[in-house]
Every structure is written in structure tokens, then in C-alpha cells.
Amino acid sequence: MTKRKKSNLLIYVILCIVTVVVLFPLYFIILNSFKGKFFISKQPFELPTGKLFAGITNYVNGLERTGLIQAAGWSLFITIASVAFIILFTSMTAYYLTRVKGKTTSVLYYLFVFSMVVPFQMVMFTMTDLADKFHLRNPLGMCILYLGFGAGLSVFMFAGFVKSIPIEMEEAAMIDGCTPLQTYFRVVFPILKPTAITVAILNEKWIWNVFLLPYLVIGISTKYKTIPVVIQMLVGTNGNKDMGALMAMLVLSVVPIIIFYMTCQKYIIEGVVAGAVKG
């Protein structure tokens, strides 16, 4: 066996191990979602057969206790609207900061970059106070907050891609009579499609799964609860928790993410390849 083949075999083995490590938690959750809640803690790794098998009871109980369907609707609305806001506004911001050179734009760019390293815990109390003052404790307000938290990384990624776009293309469009906005939407934005999809995937994942932000802003006493918030309600207090229903709801919560990934898989690969070529 040549040195190259040995190297490829080693990489293959490492990737297989990483795949197992990543997929095992999902396998564990699916496995236990079909067990009776009293058997999960006693026999967590046993297959759900015989008396361990609970059918879809956990799913029915979880849906009845949490109102997951309504929560999924609010989560879907907030996620789609937030991602749309992030892609539209941050791409335009990155385009402006990249094309308009000056001290002000440089300061703004580095402020966006700096915001990526600021932990959420540092600003969460101030953020909740501002949410009260500006009446943001609703789904549309959540979209505005997500836009703020997602702007740093998104502007950074879009700015890096805009720098690789030849400015001659924009000059040609302006010679043909396009306004700056027309130039952006007809020439620049279509070229940003791979980066836009990458930004959408990165933001969609954390917006869909985040618990603390909607819990602090929307809370559990309104009808706008998102999926992570209603699932957390199954944990209960003083050991009063339904692990079976909890596992079942976790399975249902990841299904939209998997569907989204499978649908956009082709575009994800295109984005990675385009980024490699541009870089």
C-alpha cells in the first residue's frame, strides 16, 4: 500500500469515527422516543422491543402537552422572516461598506466584526430592557433582534465575497443606465447567491434551535412560544418530567432542519466550491 493510499485510508477512518460521534445522539433520541418513559432511564441503550415499545404514545402525549404544532408555526415564521431580513439587509450593508471607502465605513465594518466575539450573556439584560421599551416582545420584534445578533457574521461573509466581484461589472451596468440599487439587485445580488445560501443555513440553524433569547423576550406565558421553549416545558421540576415525550418532541423538532438541509444540499456544495474558487 502506497503512502497516499494509507493517508486516504486514515482520513476515511477518522471521518467515519466523526460521523458516528455526530449521529449517535440523534440515534439515541430516536431510539428512546419509542420507549415507555419508565424504561428510558433504566435501559437507555436497549432497542424498543417487547414491553419497552410504546408505539407513538410519546409523540401523542408530547403534542398534547406542549402545543408543538402551534409552536412550530411561530418558529417557522420567525426563522424564515429573520433569515430573509438578515440576507437582504446585511448583504446591502456589506456591499456599501466594501464599495464606499472611508473612515466611517471602516469603523462600521470593524464594529460588525467585533460584534461576533461579544457573548450573548453580556448583552442579554440590556437587550431585554430594550425589547420592553421598543415593544419587541412579539414575533416581528424577535426578527429584528435576530437581525441584530446575526448581522456581524453575515456582514463579514458577504463583505469577503463582494471584494472578489470585479467592479467593472458594476461600472458597465451603470453605463447602461442602472441606478445603484438596480446595479445591486440585478448584477451584484445574483452573484452573491452561494454566500447568501451559506448565510441562510448558518442563521437558520441557530435561530430555529436557540432557547434563551425567545425565552427571555417572549417567555412562556404568551401564545408566541417557539419550539425550544415548549420542549423545555416537558423537563418539569422536582424530577417531574416525561422523558419519552421529551425525546419524541426533540425528534419532531429536528425534522424541518433535516428537510431544509436535504433540499438545499446542492446549493450548499455550490457555495463551498464557489467560496474555494473565489478564495
Image (cartoon, rainbow, N blue to C red):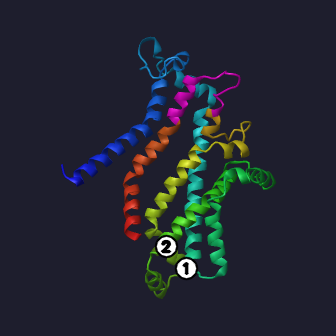
**Residue at image x 63%, y 70%?**
110
- Which one is in front, 261 or 184? 261
Magenta stretch holds residue 126: no
The Cα–Cα distance between marks 1 and 2, rounded to whole angstroms, is: 9 Å
Query: Residue beneath label 1, please?
Result: 99
**Residue at image x 36%, y 54%?**
266
Q: Position of residue 255 (x, y in %)?
A: 47, 38
Please state which amino acid type lies under the numbered disc 2.
Val
Q: Position of residue 21 (x, y in %)?
A: 43, 38
Q: SS at mark 2? A: helix
- Mark 1 surroundings within 10 Å by alpha-carbon count, few (fewer than 14), some (14 through 19), many (20 or more): few
CB-based contact (under 8 Å), mark 1 and mark 2:
yes
Q: SS at mark 1? A: helix
- Which one is in front, 164 or 55? 164
Identify the mark at residue 162; answer none if there is no mark: 2
Provide the residue span drawn in magenta: 232-252
Q: How many marks?
A: 2
Q: Position of residue 162 (x, y in %)?
A: 49, 73
- Which one is in front, 60 or 182? 60
Left or right: 120 with respect to 189? right
Q: Position of residue 232 (x, y in %)?
A: 64, 33
Please state which amino acid type lies under the numbered disc 1.
Arg
* Image: 152 above or below 54: below
- Which one is in front, 177 or 41? 41
**Residue at image x 37%, y 60%?**
270
